Every structure is written in structure tokens, then in C-alpha cells.
Amino acid sequence: MLLLLRKTGGERPRGGGCTCLLLLLLLLLEASLPLVSAKGFPDIPGDFCRNRKPSECCEDRYDDCSVPILGTLCYCDEFCLVKDADTVHDDCCPDFREVCLGERPEEKPSQDDPGQLHYSVCEKDGVRLLFGTSYKFNCNTCWCEKGGLVCEEDQCMVDEDVIEEVNFRLRQYGWRATNYSSFWGRKTKDGLLLRTGTLYPQDLSTDLHPIKLSPDVSSIPQKFDARTEPRWQGRIGGVADQGWCGASWAFSTMGVIQDRISIVAKGLANIQLSAQNLLSCAKLGQNGCDGGYIDRAWHYLRRVGVVLEECYQYESGASGKVPKCLIHGKDTSNLECEHKYQYKSEPAYRISSKEEDIQWEILTNGPVQAMMEVHSDLFMYKSGVYSYSGLAGQETASHSVKIIGWGEAALPDMEPVKYWVVSNSWGTEWGERGHFRIRRGINELGIESFIIAVRPRLANYVYGGTEADIRT
């Protein structure tokens, strides 16, 4: 007898049944047509569901959702699937899985039948991938190919295992970690290139000798923060965001000079200078969003100067590209703003790596610039006193930041931990409202090895249409 009804193993047959005429015709044809195996039609080549009109596949259960095959019918509706959605009924068309489920045959012969194509499904972390498809797991893409799953193996900026370990051993590491959505899906190598961007000066000992200070150690407080210092109320700038451009060399330079200008200007609030001006116009030896030298940035500020942010707004953070300079020497006519004054500095000077010298300089004259090495675990920093965890690989990049203060953190049953308060350039959503604390006095990741300070050029500066005297 031909296979006339769905072989459903006790399930009810399709509604409507078969007419007597159809039964008679099929019985007459039975003697002249080959028998169809009760196992279905998996090995029959040809297009069946693919050529079915008006549509290829149907939802639910419809007797009319069928096409002729070997004197009977095969089906292209969802009733072909059994409950586990992995197996199909025996009377489904041979191309049902490919056409209706979107699967592709893997061109690999089976041991039982070398001429048969098999469907391949790969699985990772609970995600099933059909043959020939891909899926992005955090920052790495995986492909389901011949022979199984093939994945990239790059380190990601956000590593859930590192976050879990740091937070589980809070007493050991001293800081908390978190997942930042802006960093999720990004590779560590991209973060180390585009979220840092300071190149280490080549001739430190020749160009910038550390000056000798004679600090009054007894007058250095145990805790200090330039943001809350009464002498400088409202004159310390906020946190910037360099975006996806390796321009920390420009942002840390701007952060220090604009704070120090605001500190010495009588009775006026802080100003915001243009990092884009420095990034686009200080071309000598600089690599734009691929990194730059802070000593050359200070040289440009001394010789040329930069305008206010309102005159030359930052745009490289979104594009990763550096537009051409709009200023030619002293010609600022291309800028669309009212006050186009170019703010300058005196030559930058280097502070020794002694803890007391760095504190004294900040206490006396304002925030300083520092260089440090960045490991990928810093991208996950949330709060606490940071030190390198040793969990996130050995790749590093040079970064520059602004140190604005210091303090000590009390931990249960432990000696107080000394720290620096540091202003970063990764936006206010990161860390402690854009800042982080890092261990002090042990040169953690080199943060005390190269400290730069500067004095504003002694001249009259323009603030909102008025000139402000500079204290000598």
C-alpha cells in the first residue's frame, strides 16, 4: 500500500481525509509505481517545498501545503516538526529543513551513505548556529563550518571571568569591577590603541630634567582633592571623553593647562580649552588618533597655543579620524566664535618621582600630568583603590592622565592603603564619575615615574569678552 496519510505514531491524521476517487486512482497506480519507504523521503533529490506556489512553507497544519512526490504527497508545513523541533515526520519533503528551517547541507558524506548530505548545527554557550552562519560572542565572532565551530580568540575589553574574580576577592584586590556597555563587544587591542594613545617621550633625561623641590612635608595634609580646595572653588575642570581616538596625550595636556590658567586668574571660573585644536594642528611628530607625545604637545602650547573648546569642538572621538587644521599660525579667521584668543604656556617642567614632591606641586600650583601603563583590567574598573590584578593578560599601552589629589583608604583588619586621585578621559560613566584611585608611593604601573607640570604664560587672558589678570 502506498504511503497516503502522515505516519504520525498515534497522532490524529490531517482533517478532511482522502476522497474515494483519489483512493481509487492511487490504487490503480500502485502496481506501476515504485514503493515509497515508510522512512520518508530524505534521499530524493530535487526542489519540492522550494517550488511550491503560492508560498513555499506554511504555518500550523494544512493538507494543501504539499507537493507531489513519487505518486504521493510530501508536506511543507510546521506539522512536519515534532515537539523537540529537531526531528521531522517521515512525510516531509526532502528539502523541508533547508527551505523551511533555513538550514544548509554540509557537504560531508556520511559513513553509511557517502553520497548523502548532512545538516550541521554548532553550539556554544547555549547558542545554536546553523551551518554557514556566524554569531558574535562578546568581541569574538564564531562560524559554523565544516568540521565544527571556528571562533576568534582575541581578548575582550570586558571579561566576565575577570569581573567575577575581582569582585569575589575584594579584600585581595581592593577594587570593584563592572561591565561597561560602551566597552562590551570591543577587543582589548582596540581599547589599548584607541582609549589610551600617549607615546613615551624618547629623550626624557635630556629634554626634561626633574626639578628639585624642597617641600614642607609637615604641611602636606593626609588627604587633598583639588576639586574641593577652597582656594580653587569652581576652577578645576570636569572629566572629558576622548572616545575611540588615541588622544590621551592631548586631553591630559589640556586638562592640566586649563586648570592652572583658571587657578591663577583672579576671581574667574574654569575654562575649557580645545583638545581638537591640539590634535589637528600639532602635527610635528604626532600620530593623531594613533597616539602622540606629551613633550611635543607642551612645545606646541608654548610656541602657538590653543583656543577655547567653543571655538574648535571635539569630533575625532566618534569618527577616529583627525580633520585638517583650521588655524594657520595666528590666523583664526576660519573659526566661528567670538573670542579666538590662543592660550599659551611657559615651558613644561618635570617633577621628581618622590611622593612628597608630587604632593607639594599639586598642593601649591594645581593638578599635574602623569604617564602610566594600562592593562585591560582597568577598562573594567568601577570603584576602590586600583592596582593591577594580574588577571587580564600582559598587553599594555601608555596612557596619560591628570592627578588631582591623594588620600588613604581604610580597610578592615588591614593597614590603610595610600592612593592618588586621578582624572581620566573616558567619560563620567566610567569609574568613580570619570575618576579612579590608584595606589600611591609604590609607582604602580609607572604613574609616579614621569610627572609634568607647567605655568601659564604671563599675559592677559580673555574670558567671555573680558580680560583677566594673571597672578605672577
Image: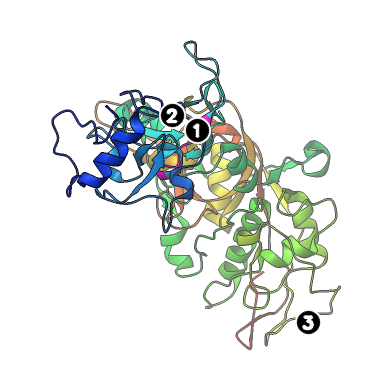
Label 3 vs label 1: CA separation?
56 Å
As rendered, which of 137 and 145 lies closer to the eye? 145
Residue 15 location in percent, x, y? 17, 48
What residue sits 13% from the left and 38% below the top?
Answer: 12
Magenta stretch contains residue 128? no
What residue sits 60% from the left and 52% below the top?
Answer: 368
Label 3 or label 1, whichever lies nearer to me, is 1
State yes or no: discs 1 and 2 in contact (Cβ < 8 Å).
yes
- Relative to residue 291, is residue 171 depicted above or below? above
Residue 74 sits in quarter: top left
What residue sits 54% from the left and 78% below the top?
Answer: 268
Label 2 vs label 3: CA separation?
59 Å
Give the residue number, with chain letter if any, for mark 1: 131
As rendered, which of 47 and 443 lies closer to the eye? 47
- Relative to residue 190, is residue 257 depicted above or below? below
Residue 60 location in percent, x, y? 25, 49
- Magenta region, residue range: 100-105
Residue 205 location in percent, x, y? 79, 36
Give the position of the C terminus as an image quadrant. bottom right
Amino acid type, residue under disc 2 in the picture: Val
As rendered, which of 34 and 413 lies closer to the eye? 34
Give the position of the N terminus as an image quadrant. top left
* Local SS, label 3: loop
As rendered, which of 218 and 16 lies closer to the eye? 16
Question: From where the camera sits, is residue 157 visible?
Answer: no
State yes or no: discs 2 and 3 in contact (Cβ < 8 Å).
no
* Mark toward the start of the polypeptide (1 vs 2): 2
Give the residue number, with chain letter if any, for mark 2: 121
- Relative to residue 232, is residue 142 depicted above or below? above
Give the residue number, with chain letter if any, for mark 3: 334
